[in-house]
Image (spheres, coloured by chain):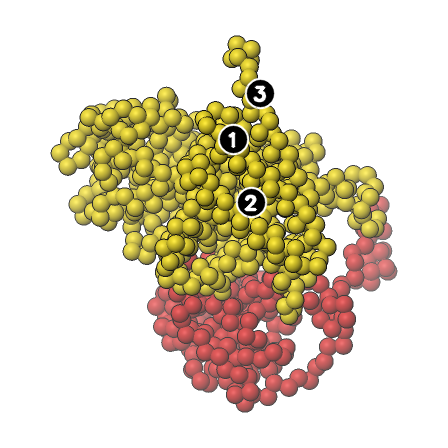
Amino acid sequence: MKIIVGVKRVLDYNVKARVKADKSGIELANVKMSMNPFDEIAVEEALRVKEAGHADEVIAVSIGSSQSQETIRTALAMGADRGILIETDELLEPLAIAKLFKHVVEKEEPGLVILGKQAIDDDANQTGQMLSALTGMSQATFASKVEFDGDHLKVTREVDAGLESIKVKLPSIVTTDLRLNEPRYAKLPNIMKAKKKPLETIPVADTGVDISSGLSVVEVNDPPKREAGIIVNSVAELVDKLRNEAKVI
Amino acid sequence: MTYTAPVKDIAFVLNHVVGLADIAKLSGFEDASPDLVDAILDESARFTSDVLAPLNWIGDQQGSQWVAGEVKTPEGWKEAYSQFTENGWGSLSFSPEFGGQGLPMSVSAAVQEMWHSANMSFGLCPLLTQGAVDAIEHHASDELKQRYLPKMVEGSWSGTMNLTEPQAGSDLAAVRTRAEPAGEHYRISGQKIYITYGEHDLTENIIHLVLARLPDAPAGVKGISLFIVPKFLINEDGSIGERNDVNCVSIEHKLGIHASPTCVMSYGDNGGAIGYLVGKEHQGLVYMFTMMNQARHAVGVEGYGIAERAYQKAVAYSRDRKQGKTLLGKSEEDQGIINHPDVRRILMTMRSTIEAMRGLGLECAAAFDQARRHPDETVKARMQRRGELLTPLVKGWSTEMGVELCSLGVQVHGGMGFIEETGAAQFLRDARIAPIYEGTTAIQANDLIGRKTARDGGQGMSELMSDMQETLAALNKHDHLDMKAIAKRLKPAIESAQSATEWLLGQNDATLPSATSVEYLMMQGRLAGGWMIARSALAALRLKNSEGADTAYLDAKITLARYYAERMLPLVESAHTIVIDSAETTIALDTAQL
């Protein structure tokens, strides 16, 4: 069985995001970029599944500029077997990404696709669900535990009310939550071997997928500055303020 | 207490100042391509800041503990060490023949800086193993290499250097530990002190390299041989066998590096520890120098590694801490003490000196890489001279400055800096050992003026000076205010150093030069650092023209270089006077008058 994992190149989680002067987006020039943390968890899970003998090959897939090769190399250094980059300089929306993943899924026929539940840059949380709808594969989102059970997966999901256990039939799409696992550090010899692992680059045009967007970004702004707090004298005053000033209850 | 590895700064020096791309062209170093090295630096940054750095404070507070001959390392160290070796970090520069990755020393030095910034006490264990591996690889028989190296390269066995005895510190001629031939091996007995990681619970075996005398040995340094003495003997099939007759009698209570066990080792309490001769008889000191040169460079890296950590802490504190209205703050909120001009002085001094030291440390390593792999024998010899000449500067100057900068780091914190919980004091305490072990600063200075300068009639030094002249000419070619300002200070500094070297070479005996040799070493170190940071300014200027250049970052590099030139290079000029004029008065008093 093959496993496909999605790896996205995003602004490093330690870097404070700054809005560009023209408000067209976030400043990404000359800042540290790295793999989306949820995708690291996805890669780790795929490797564990392979190490447990349930899969033979882990393929890391990224969609983005040629620099996304670095992100794929990171996945290869962690232990993925090969990489595929669908190259485009355009900033794509989840639907286009899901369609491109479908293209890869049709070609590779994986038994399992593991994606991060969301990317920390746009926080969309859509690709996995859309890919499931497009391919007809089952979906298990926000996974905090994944177990194999014959041709099924038992997945524990993190939902608002607590934990939900479900069983899905393979082939399936799993999206990872924060507590699924703790990603490994790449070993030095594997970092060196990663350079020699196969990495196929496919220009987005060659996929024949329609990546046109229905949305346009009007403006990106900083969140409002946090204002200084006050100390209230009574619970009644607090309730009053929440109800009448903040209008949250 | 966090640490963020300065990957961008380190990669800048490797890629744009010391020429990693040229090193990667040498046969045997093809793997060290810039993109691969970037990936290595990134992962090393993650590992050191996430795993090693959080253990630094715990290590200081708990220290290693001696209990009935065994040494227990602090909480979490064992797990961190096994992760360290599993991930292959100990094997970076070792020969692939024994399981290493065969990467250049310049890459290894770049990675090691992170170990020492994150956790100097931890970094010492692999540092010592590295020295021991080098000595075995260069000088031991194939059989010994096969038996010991794979496990040591892997990191599951660590290595130590056993030189010092109570009466034999800087003077190894006084070594008394004995080795008696006993069939195919030897029986070693005697006491060794100051043995870093001589005993610990991180690895399944510890391989001691021990200096000892054979019964027929001539007196002095020419009668010392080098032996491998494993803590556990190795069976024929390579498995761990019986416990050898070597014991850790106690560990020292120290000013700093509390987690690194400094052991008193006793050999042969029960008939003699079994040891194996490395190479030939009576050649021990020569072989030990293979370890020493490597280890001296590594200790120099510790010097700026620990200063980098102190700097990061000082910057973070000075942004947060507010005291009074500042002269440089731009708004009501922007009133951290970082906006007091004097705090800027401290931070600029720390930052620019660290960059100068890092440049020099990596330049020295790059020279050794060229010396090892360059196809042209003339270049090879020249680069070997260069690496050897720079080693005492990297060790002596960087460790002395490491202490000074860590002290400045305390100063930024004011009264809080003097309080242990703040953590700034630990860096200062830890840094203090670096100018002492692996040869004190005075030993480095002797090495510099004697073996590295006088012995070749100043050839290596004059090659270095002419390379500096080239950098000066390159600065002068630019019609650029900062380049001119740097050149203005670099020129008289080079001239002062040349003149001091001439004075040195003109002396008939070593007495006067020895009196001010440390001043001379500091002078040459400061100048060499200035040369490196000037080259980094030139690189930054060049890169500013490239597409998508990070202008703010490159401008900062140039300003830091100019600051260093204006703040540090004048000290080279004044050192000229000190080196020459104060030599006689240094030794003028009778000992009774002191």
Name which of mark 1 and mark 3 comes first in the sequence: 1
Task: Residue type at mark 2: give it.
Answer: Ala
Residue A68 location, quadrant: bottom right
Give the structural element (helix, strand or loop) at label 1. Answer: helix
Q: Nearer the viewer, residue B482 or B318?
A: B482
Query: Which chain contains the residue that carries disc 1?
Result: B
Task: Residue type at mark 1: give it.
Answer: Ser
**Where's the C terminus of chain A, which quadrant?**
bottom right
The hue used for chain B is yellow
Q: Nearer the viewer, residue A123 or B104?
A: B104
Residue highlighted by disc 3: B585
Which class describes the residues within 10 Å of circle 1: few (<14), some (14-19), or many (20+)? many
Q: Position of residue A138 (x, y in %)?
A: 49, 78
The hue used for chain A is red
Q: Is residue B463 left or right of residue B182?
A: right
Res. B274 visible in picture: yes
Residue B221, disc: none
Residue at 19 percent of width and 43 percent of height? B235
